[in-house]
Image: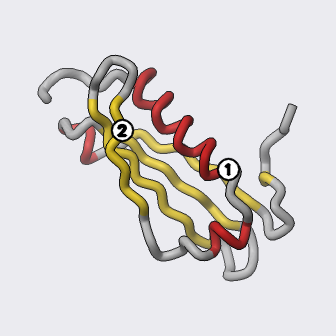
Amino acid sequence: MGSKLNKTEALAVLETELARWRRLSFSALVERIGHSETLDIRGASGTPYQVEVQVFWDNAPGGVLRVLGSVDDGSLRAFVPLTQDFLLGPDGSLVGENEA
């Protein structure tokens, strides 16, 4: 596991997983606050990645939720994983994103 992280593939793995989380309701995400979910996912190249997703209040309880995902391949990159997140308002709308 000493090779360089394939950022394109790792981000694709993370984006695919976060897309699943974007489909969850606000209340379903609230239930996941305080519990991180860790998944082992194999990329298209066969490289194993570890994805971790956490949900927490962005500013104050009852307000906007932040869903944060991180991905690494178990190499030194695990100390500084690639991350992406999204914000979800109590009304179920994505905050700060334009949906086309």
Q: Seen from this angle, which residue lies furthest left?
A: 2
Badge 1 marks a residue whose secondary structure is: helix
Question: For the residue carrying disc 2, how many other residues have a C-alpha within 10 Å: few (<14), some (14-19), or many (20+)?
Answer: some
Q: Nearer the viewer, residue 52 or 3?
A: 52
Q: Which residue is mark 2?
A: 41
Q: State the residue at coordinates (66%, 69%).
A: 28
| Residue type of the residue flagged with mark 1 | Arg
Question: For the residue carrying disc 1, how many other residues have a C-alpha within 10 Å: few (<14), some (14-19), or many (20+)?
Answer: some
**Above or below 49: residue 24:** below
Left-right relation of 98 to 78: right
Q: State the residue at coordinates (79%, 54%).
A: 95
Q: Seen from this angle, which residue lies furthest top?
A: 45
Badge 2 marks a residue whose secondary structure is: strand
| Residue type of the residue flagged with mark 2 | Ile
Return the x and y of residue 84 as percentages of the image width and height: 54, 44
**Which mark, by number, is residue 6?**
none
**Above or below 13: residue 20:** below
**Above or below 93: residue 29:** below
Left-right relation of 97 to 47: right
Q: Earlier in the sequence, mark 1 or mark 2?
A: 1
Q: State the residue at coordinates (41%, 30%).
A: 10
Q: Seen from this angle, which residue lies furthest bottom?
A: 61
Return the x and y of residue 70 as percentages of the image width and height: 43, 47
Q: Quadrant of the C terminus?
A: top right
Question: What is the quadrant of residue 48 in the picture?
Answer: top left
Q: Which residue is mark 1?
A: 22
Residues at marks 1 and 2, CA–CA distance in whole angstroms: 18 Å
Q: State the residue at coordinates (41%, 39%).
A: 82
